[in-house]
Image (cartoon, helix red, strand yellow):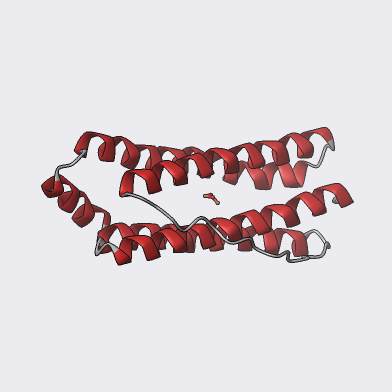
Amino acid sequence: MISEKMVKEINDQIQRELFSEYLYLQMAAYFKGENLDGFAHWIEVQAREEHTHAMKFFNHLYERGAKVVLQPIQQPKNDFKSPLDTFKYAYEHELTVTKNINNLMELAKKENDYASESFLKWYVDEQVEEEDSFLKIVSLLEKIKDSSNALFMLNNELGKRE
Ligand code: OFO
């Protein structure tokens, strides 16, 4: 039986995953406005992934006989100054999400909720991947500095994300 506390925390996490989707869509809008369509595509794909993260939690609650209660989604930041500024912000955001997932895992362990623990392992691994992909782009953008040629090359690469 899943505890009320775990249900509440997972409902909060659904909100946070949907907020991630919203934030990344706002970033895609920034890149579109800058005519950096490859960056916009990459982050749009990420936004879609966040939606699937939310839906996995959504379905988990129903599989456990619990109820989803959706919450308001706050307005994301929308005054990005540069691709580097944007990706640094996204990376920091992912670090916060990792903490949230780790907190959920701690709760599952504390409550001997083996089903949630097993389910959450996927998110623990996913966060390793997400931190890594954002950090790689931050590091490339730091190397690129003001080279518009290198920026357009990276833009092309990011446009290939499936
Ligand atoms: Fe859902 O992993 Fe990013 O936020």
Can you say whether 111 is above or below 80 in the image?
above
In the image, taking residue 113 as reference, residue 84 lies left or right, namely left
Front residue of 83 and 128: 83
Front residue of 51 and 72: 72
Total marks placed: 0
In the image, taking residue 142 as reference, residue 108 lies left or right, namely right
Where residue 141 sits in the image (x, y, percent)?
Answer: 27, 40
Give residue 150's quadrant in the image.
Answer: top left
**Residue 1 makes an appearance in the image:** no
Can you say whether 34 is above or below 128 in the image?
below
Where residue 45 sits in the image (x, y, percent)?
Answer: 40, 61
Can you say whether 52 is above or below 116 in the image?
below
In the image, taking residue 129 as reference, residue 66 lies left or right, namely right
Give residue 155's quadrant in the image.
Answer: bottom left
Q: Residue at x 26, y 38 (%)?
A: 140
Q: Residue at x 71, y 58 (%)?
A: 60
**Residue 145 makes an appearance in the image:** yes
Give residue 96's quadrant in the image.
Answer: top right
Where residue 57 sits in the image (x, y, percent)?
Answer: 67, 57
Among all residues in the image, which is located at the extreme left?
Answer: 149
Of the 4 image quadrants, the one containing the C terminus is bottom left
Q: Residue at x 46, y 58 (%)?
A: 78
Front residue of 44 and 55: 44
In the image, taking residue 49 as reference, residue 101 lies left or right, namely right
Q: Residue at x 52, y 43 (%)?
A: 94
Where residue 22 sits in the image (x, y, percent)?
Answer: 53, 62
Front residue of 80 and 112: 80
